[in-house]
Each structure stands twice: as structure tokens, then as C-alpha cells.
Image (cartoon, grey):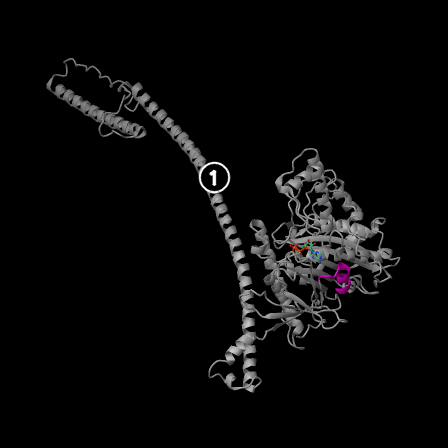
């Protein structure tokens, strides 16, 4: 088994084994010790005895393996964090290079313990901060005393962030903030638990009965707070709940006073701290919940941040808009760390009482410039410390609902991380000159954040690629399937060793007519058969691995499918609700418009009818005034031809009838006049002209100056 080339590998990968509490389980992981003088680098895992799949024994190589007995200091020294910190500080006259320290492992395997420590032991983060400040403090710029330095730092920042001095930031938080806490380092959680327990004890002494669900589970420095605990804490200790954690009460060991560190003594430094978490593939600032003005505020809705190139950082992506705190001492930096961890998502699961539900990023940005009377620009490099959420199987972790959905996202991002690490390991093993495969790190936020700075920029003179240290944690008595999965993709090299199975060989050997039967124990035929068998078993083992990986992926896919189905159903319900609401709204609007139109139409129709009535009345008036007609108001319409006709039409019909009648009468009148004239002429012809002319009495319409139509 060949190890990776350290020059090309993106990470040094260490394995840390945790002391297990599950003594009833079978140990599946063994550390190989080549000799007493060298450090262990290889492990083998063998499937449990009751493994039905008959999986092969596997052997993995790491940069170094830390056994259960290794303490925090041993891990700190052995995992080469010192060169990482020195790299960030930069050698004399040179810019620093980014560093990444991350822990990876199954849930409950000890990632947070390694990175953040316990009640009695400091974690790698605290040790790193201690080392950094212990050596840089004589070279730190006095930001609090010089507003010019502070403003120059603000100007030099490329990530559109808000900068605070630690004093301002911490005063804002611990002055009057009422934001609820979520998590802290195990040491800090222990303090809170103790306070909680003490309060319950004093309450029960005063006769107050403690609810059944409020027992605190302490498990090697961590535990869970029930809802009743939280509400009790908020009522009983609201005044000091967000009290500044006392540094004296936090773990002080191991100490690192004896470690030397190389730094650039011609430079002046500032240390800027920021924190964020990746939760459900979104980035959230862990220091952004407090108000900058110091005023107490209700919990705000968290705003997701973008990982992108900014105006001042076109060539590399940064998390834009973070809140950053300039720290002048290790105490300030640790207080900021504790403050940020309070915001981080944690939950109790079947596998871990305080399980991280997000990937936590703690960034220590070291800014450096030449110490001179004329201010020079700040350069900056960052040490990012990552506490990854653990992969978990729903069955083991007994998660459900939102916690199960979170687990789906966590497992998905870890699967992508696994692919990237596998690819980088393959690249590191590639034959010299062969083209390297692209590491697919753009698949999710986590891999983007972890790997974006790991590759050399095109302009090689600008920035050295980030150096990474990955500490894989494992419980040798834990979940075999989940652990072997992580080891497979994180190890620097892997080898499948197939154990000889004498029973199988002998059975084959004993087959009647088989060639083996004729050969001796070490005959060429037997050796050949044994080697074929080995090859076959290796192939079977490889296929089994693939099957196992596929089954794992299938499980992930099924979880994701369930998640998508649930969200699909929820969306469908929402769509139906929205549709019903829109329909209702439209109906009401249509109804009101219709009513309005109806009113308008009625008003217009009434106005028209009134005008027509007035017109008809005027006409009838004229008829009536002419004296030739008498106008009657029809009580009802008895004309069978007009039955059912609307009143307006009736009016028209009446007018038409009136006009026709008047014309008829006019004609008749004319005829009568002609007849009279003719009769008079006949009479004049028959009688003498001396006879007195009989004067006809004028008829009613004769002698009148008014015509039938009423006009003179
Ligand atoms: N090396 C160790 N020595 C002593 N205790 C340990 C060690 N590693 C882990 N533990 C204990 O095991 C428990 C679980 O560890 P931890 O919370 O660090 O797991 P984790 O991997 O971070 O889990 P998750 O992914 O769910 O957050 C804790 O109580 C922790 O103190």
C-alpha cells in the first residue's frame, strides 16, 4: 500500500480513536504498530463476527493514528498544527498562507471533543488561540487605542464585513442581550448544567416539585437541557443567563507554555475572529444575532450569507457580510468563540446528547503589515477551524422530523466531501505526469468552503494554496458500517486484505476429480488455484464494498426522496390554499364589479326611460292641447298583440298608433272638405245666383289656425 505524496495532497489526514463507553460491543478496529520507535500510521478493520455479508478485512493508512490514550496535547503536537499556525503568520517579509483544521467522523465519535475540548481539557481551538496570542501579543497593533489602525483594518477588509473591537462586541452581548442560547463548548455547557441542577435543588428544598422530564443527562462533559430546564433558567437566572463566562471556570489544561513559534518580528499583527455555520446548505453568521447598538432586541430572523467574489476580492470567494471581531487577547477570542457557539444548532439524538446539527466554522484571520512609520497595507491569511456535523444513520440516531431532515442534509454534504477527498487521494496517488482529475468541490456549500482555497491560483505568485489538517475521529467499538464508510473515503491509502479461508480451499481441494486433489499441498496446481481463489475473493470483496457504498447511497437517496415528497405534499397543500384564496378573491372582485355595472346600467336605463317619458308626455301634451284628442292613461295593456311587450316598447307602439290615427283623420278630413266643396259647387249650379247663399257652419277644425300636428 503506497501512501500519498505529501506535496500534492490537500490534507494531512490523522485518525483519532476515542475511548469507547460501549463495552458490550465487539472491537472492530486495530492499530498496527510496526515498531516501538515509530508512530502508528495504519489500522485494520474487520467486520463483526456476525456479519452476514462476509466482508473483507480492510487496511487504511493515515498520516498518523492517535490511540484512545492520546490526550489533547498529544493530538495538538502530533497533528502538526504548529506549522499550520506558522504558515498563517507568514515567514519574515512574506505573506501568510491560509490554513484549515477540520474534524470529520461519525456522530458521537469525538469531533467536538477534539476541536472544542471538554470540561477539564481544552480543545485544539483553545490551544491554537493560546499559542497564537502568546507569541504575537508583543507584535499586536493596539487597535483599541488607535482609531486610525481600526479604520485601516476596515478599509483593508475585502469581505464587506462589519468590524467591531472585542470590547464593543462583548459589551453589546453581555450588557443586555436576551437572545436564547443554543450550545457552547462542553466546558461551558457543564457550567450551565451545574447552575441548572443547583437551581432545581434549591427550588425542591423550597417545596417546589421538579417535573419528570427535567433530568439532565451528563455524559463526559456534555448533555441536554429540557424545555422545563430552559424555562426555569430563563425565569430563575435571567439576570445572569448571558453573564460573561468566567475564564477561570473554563478548562485551563493542557498548557502549551513550552511551545516555540516562528513569526515575523518585523511585522505588526492584528487578529480578527469571525464565526459561521453551514446549516441545510446555507451559511449563517454566528455572531450576527446581537445588536450593534447594544439595545436589547427580539430574536431576529437569520439571513443567509453568500460565498462569492466581492468587489475587493475578484480572484477569490469569501463569505460576504460577516460580523468580525478584532481581538487583542486569548480571553477575548475565547469569549467570542463561546458567544458564537451559543448560536450554533445542536440537538439531542440517539447517538449524541449534544449533537452538532450544522458544520461550524471558526475563522482566525491574521492581518499583517510591515512595522514602519509610514503605514503599509495589511495582508491577511486565515486559519479556519471546522467542527463538522457527524454523519449518522437515522435508525441508530433515532431521529425524526426536522432532525431527520437535517441529518439528510448533513449526510449529503458529507457524501460530497467524501467524493472530494477520494478524488484528492486518487490525484495524490496518480502516476507522475498523469492528468489530475478535477475535485468536484462545487457540489455543495461545505465542500466549496473547504476546498475553494486549496488549489493554486492561476497567478502562482499571488497566493500559496491553503494547507489542511483533517482529524478523523472514530469509536473502535461504535457503528462498524458508518465508521468504515468514513475511513474508506478519508484514508490516504486503502488496501483490502482477504483472509485465507481454509475451509473453502480444502472443500475445493476435496472435490472428486478436482485437479487440486491430485497435486500436493504446495503443488503448482494448488498454488495456481489458491491464487485464483484469492483473486476471486478480492473481486467479491470489491463488489461487496461497491454494494455497500451503493446501499448507503440508496439509503441517503431514500431519505432525500422522503424529504422531497414531504415538501412536495406541503407545497401541494400550499398551492391548493393559495388557489382557493385567489379564486375567492377573484369571485368577490367580479361580484362587486358586476354589482357596480348593474347599478350603472340601471341608472342609465332609468335616465333614458325618463327622457323618453318626458318626450312622450310633451307630445301627448301637444295632442291634448290641440283639442282633437283626449289622452287616456292605459290602466293596463289589453291588446293581445302587445301583451308581454316591455313598457318602453309599449310607449313606442302607442306613439306609432297615435301618429297613424292622426294621419287617417287628416285624410278623412281632406276628403270631407273636397266633398263639401263639390256639393256646394253642384248647388250653385242648380240654384240662381240671386238666391241667398247658405253659409255652412264652420266645423270645429275649420277656421282654426292650428294644424293637426299642433303647429299654426
Ligand atoms: N477522546 C475522548 N476522550 C474522552 N471523551 C471523549 C473523547 N472523544 C469523545 N468523547 C466524549 O464523547 C461524547 C461525544 O463526543 P462529541 O460530542 O465530541 O461527538 P461529535 O463527534 O462531535 O458528535 P456530533 O457529530 O453528533 O456533534 C462527549 O461526551 C465527549 O466528551
Task: Name the image quarter holding residue 534.
Answer: bottom right
Residue that extends furthest to the top in the rendered view of this protein: 692
678 to the left or right of 266 = left
Which portion, as a residue range, is magenta?
68-79
- Report x, y in % for residue 428: 67, 72
646 to the left or right of 215 = left
Q: Which residue is drawn at 32% across and 24% down?
A: 619
Res. 312 visible in picture: no
Task: Name the image quarter holding residue 35.
Answer: bottom right
* Quadrant placement of the C terminus: top left
Task: Name the image quarter holding residue 665.
Answer: top left
- Report x, y in % for residue 548: 55, 65
Q: Which residue is drawn at 10% across and 19% down?
A: 686
- Nearer to us in this view, 620 or 248: 248
Q: Which quarter holds ligand 1?
A: bottom right
- Nearer to us in this view, 358 or 596: 358
Residue that extends furthest to the right in the rendered view of this protein: 373
Count of numbered circles in the view: 1
92 to the left or right of 652 = right
176 to the left or right of 601 = right
Q: Can you say whether 221 is above or below 518 in the image?
A: above
> For mark 1, does the 10 Å Cα neighbourhood hold few (<14), some (14 to 19), or many (20 or more) residues?
few
Q: Can you say whether 526 is above or below 242 in the image?
A: below
* Quadrant placement of the N terminus: bottom right
Q: Can you say whether 51 is above or below 193 in the image?
A: below
- Report x, y in % for residue 529: 54, 82
Whether residue 142 is in magenta: the answer is: no
SS label for mark 1: helix
The residue tagged 1 is: 585
- Report x, y in % for residue 604: 40, 31
Amino acid at each position: 500500500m503506497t501512501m500519498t505524496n505529501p506535496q500534492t495532497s490537500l490534507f494531512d489526514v490523522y485518525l483519532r480513536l476515542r475511548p469507547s463507553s460501549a463495552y458490550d460491543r465487539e472491537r472492530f478496529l486495530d492499530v498496527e504498530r510496526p515498531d516501538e520507535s515509530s508512530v502508528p500510521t495504519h489500522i485494520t478493520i474487520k467486520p463483526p463476527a456476525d456479519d452476514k455479508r462476509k466482508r473483507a478485512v480492510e487496511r487504511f493508512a493515515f498520516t498518523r493514528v492517535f490511540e484512545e490514550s492520546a490526550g489533547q496535547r498529544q493530538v495538538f503536537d502530533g497533528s502538526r498544527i504548529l506549522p499550520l499556525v506558522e504558515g498563517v503568520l507568514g515567514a519574515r517579509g512574506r505573506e501568510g498562507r491560509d490554513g484549515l483544521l477540520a474534524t470529520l467522523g461519525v456522530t458521537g465519535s469525538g469531533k467536538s471533543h477534539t476541536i472544542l475540548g471538554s470540561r477539564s481539557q481544552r480543545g485544539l481551538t483553545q490551544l491554537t488561540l493560546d499559542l497564537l496570542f502568546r507569541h504575537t501579543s508583543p507584535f499586536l497593533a493596539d487597535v483599541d487605542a488607535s482609531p486610525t489602525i481600526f479604520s485601516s483594518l476596515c478599509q483593508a477588509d475585502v469581505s464587506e464585513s462589519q468590524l467591531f473591537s472585542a470590547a464593543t462586541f462583548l459589551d453589546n452581548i453581555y450588557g443586555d442581550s436576551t437572545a436564547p442560547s443554543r450550545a457552547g463548548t462542553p466546558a461551558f455547557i457543564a457550567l450551565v448544567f451545574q447552575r441548572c441542577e443547583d437551581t432545581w435543588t434549591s427550588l425542591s428544598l423550597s417545596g417546589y416539585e421538579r417535573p419528570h422530564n427535567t433530568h439532565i443527562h451528563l455524559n463526559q462533559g456534555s448533555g441536554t437541557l429540557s424545555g422545563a430546564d430552559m424555562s426555569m433558567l430563563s425565569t430563575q437566572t435571567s439576570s445572569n443567563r448571558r453573564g460573561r463566562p468566567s475564564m477561570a471556570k473554563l478548562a485551563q489544561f493542557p498548557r502549551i507554555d513550552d511551545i516555540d513559534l516562528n513569526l515575523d518580528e518585523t511585522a505588526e499583527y492584528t487578529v480578527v475572529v469571525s464565526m459561521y455555520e453551514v446549516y441545510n446548505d446555507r451559511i449563517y453568521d454566528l455572531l450576527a444575532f446581537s445588536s450593534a447598538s447594544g439595545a436589547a432586541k427580539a430574536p431576529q430572523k437569520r439571513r443567509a450569507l453568500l460565498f462569492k467574489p466581492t468587489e475587493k476580492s475578484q480572484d477569490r470567494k469569501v463569505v460576504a457580510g460577516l460580523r468580525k471581531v478584532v481581538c487583542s487577547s486569548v480571553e477575548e477570542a475565547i469569549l467570542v468563540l463561546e458567544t458564537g457557539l451559543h448560536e450554533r444548532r445542536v440537538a439531542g439524538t440517539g447517538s449524541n446528547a449534544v449533537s452538532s446539527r450544522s458544520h461550524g466554522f471558526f475563522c482566525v484571520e491574521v492581518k499583517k503589515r510591515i512595522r514602519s512609520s509610514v503605514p503599509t497595507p495589511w495582508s491577511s491569511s486565515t486559519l479556519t477551524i471546522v467542527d463538522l456535523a457527524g454523519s449518522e444513520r437515522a435508525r441508530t440516531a433515532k431521529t425524526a422530523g426536522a432532525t431527520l431532515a437535517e441529518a439528510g442534509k448533513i449526510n449529503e454534504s458529507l457524501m460530497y466531501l467524501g467524493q472530494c477527498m477520494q478524488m484528492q487521494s486518487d490525484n495524490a496517488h496518480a502516476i507522475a505526469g498523469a492528468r489530475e482529475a478535477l475535485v468536484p468541490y462545487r457540489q455543495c456549500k461545505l465542500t466549496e468552503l473547504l476546498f475553494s482555497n486549496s488549489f493554486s491560483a492561476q497567478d502562482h505568485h499571488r497566493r500559496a494554496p491553503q494547507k489542511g489538517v483533517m482529524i478523523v475521529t472514530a469509536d473502535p467499538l461504535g457503528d462498524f458500517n458508518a465508521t468504515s464508510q468514513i475511513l474508506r473515503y478519508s484514508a490516504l491509502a486503502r488496501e483490502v486484505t482477504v483472509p485465507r479461508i481454509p475451509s473453502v480451499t480444502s472443500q475445493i481441494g476435496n472435490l472428486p476429480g478436482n485437479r487440486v486433489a491430485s497435486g500436493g499441498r504446495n503443488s503448482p496446481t494448488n498454488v495456481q488455484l489458491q491464487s485464483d481463489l484469492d483473486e476471486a475473493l478480492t473481486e467479491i470483496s470489491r463488489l461487496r464494498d461497491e454494494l455497500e457504498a451503493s446501499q448507503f447511497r440508496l439509503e441517503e437517496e431514500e431519505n432525500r426522496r422522503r424529504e422531497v415528497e414531504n415538501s412536495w405534499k406541503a407545497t401541494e397543500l400550499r398551492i391548493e390554499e393559495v388557489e382557493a384564496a385567489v379564486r375567492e378573491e377573484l369571485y368577490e372582485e367580479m361580484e362587486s364589479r358586476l354589482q357596480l355595472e348593474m347599478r350603472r346600467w340601471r341608472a342609465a336605463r332609468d335616465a333614458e326611460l325618463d327622457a323618453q317619458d318626458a318626450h312622450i308626455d310633451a307630445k301627448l301634451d301637444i295632442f291634448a292641447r290641440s283639442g282633437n284628442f283626449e289622452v287616456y292613461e292605459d290602466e293596463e295593456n289589453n291588446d293581445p298583440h302587445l301583451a308581454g311587450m316591455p313598457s318602453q316598447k309599449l310607449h313606442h307602439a302607442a306613439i306609432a298608433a297615435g301618429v297613424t290615427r292622426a294621419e287617417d283623420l287628416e285624410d278623412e278630413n281632406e276628403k270631407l272638405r273636397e266633398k263639401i266643396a263639390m256639393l256646394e259647387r253642384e248647388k250653385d249650379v242648380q240654384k240662381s245666383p240671386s238666391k241667398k247663399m247658405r253659409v255652412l257652419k264652420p266645423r270645429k277644425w275649420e277656421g282654426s289656425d292650428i294644424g293637426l300636428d299642433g303647429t299654426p
